[in-house]
Amino acid sequence: MIVSSSCRTCFSQIALFLFAIGVLAVSTMAVSRARATTSGTFRFESVTSIDDMRKMIEADFPLGSSRALLRQNFVTEGAATQKIHPTQAGVEKYLYDINLCGYYIWRWNISADYDAGDHLLQAYVNGEPVYPAGKQKKDWKALAKSGNSSILKVIRMRPEANKGEKELSYLLLDGDGDRATIDDQVLTGSGPTRPDPFNLGKLHAYSNVEPWRSIFDFDNAAKIVNYQGSCSKVSKLYANLSVNNLSSNR
């Protein structure tokens, strides 16, 4: 972890990276229920974007769904890593990381709030609430007025992305100025919308998101799975992109 007070270059690398990829491919796909086989087994690789994940959750897990059902889907079938919130009762998350051929580590961070009877109160995709009726984001203005608040630039290292984005930067608002107390923290950052090295989609802005629920979360997944497509084709694509950029700059 690296913390700095300077934020002038927080998002420049990833913004340029996504812009370059965005012009390479544009695809339209029907929203999938993320069921990869006829047996109904869930696979994270079947979800093509953060919007599709939200729609899948809305369709398959309405408010009031059981905790066991979500665990079955994301942990048992999807092989996500389950983490219990260290301070908030009834809150847990399911982490799934994909190595996009060494250029970017994609993270699915699906978190959920449950009541005392283990019924779903709210679901979140990378820290953003799915349901308008459930719990919403924290009030950053109230956190900023605490009297001891601080704003920091934080870097989440991703050394596995040795060909691309090895550092993910975000701005952290800490309500009491103590990094060890996480319930008074929100962040502003950005990331891609698609787990596809051929087309990472658009640059998506995250604001007022709890770090523990986000793509920048420092908890590690049990493993980082490899992209299931052809990384040799991805490497050729990026090599051609680099050559074209050099040619255009001459």
Image (cartoon, helix red, strand yellow):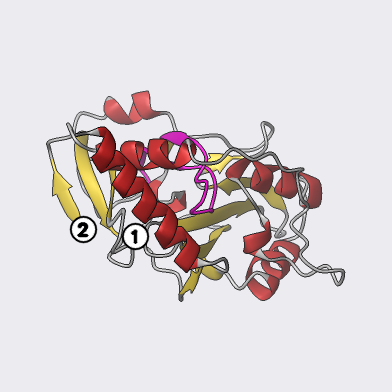
Which residue does the numbered mark 2 point to in the structure image?
1
Instruction: Using residue 235 as the reference point, say whether residue 126 is left or right of it.
Output: right
Is the Cβ of the residue at disc 1 closer than 8 Å to that at disc 2?
yes
- Tell me which corner region of the image, top left, top right, bottom left or bottom right, holds residue 12: top left
Q: Residue at x 22, y 33 (%)?
A: 249
Residue 194 to residue 150: above or below: below
Residue 139 to residue 213: above or below: above
Q: Which residues are magenta?
A: 183-207
Say whether residue 194 is magenta. yes
Label 2 neighbourhood size at 10 Å, few (<14), some (14-19), many (20+)?
A: few
Callout count: 2
Q: Residue at x 55, y 41 (%)?
A: 25
x and y, in percent, of residue 68 in the image: 73, 67
Three-letter residue code for mark 1: Phe
Q: Residue at x 21, y 47 (%)?
A: 178
Which residue does the numbered mark 1 point to in the structure image?
218
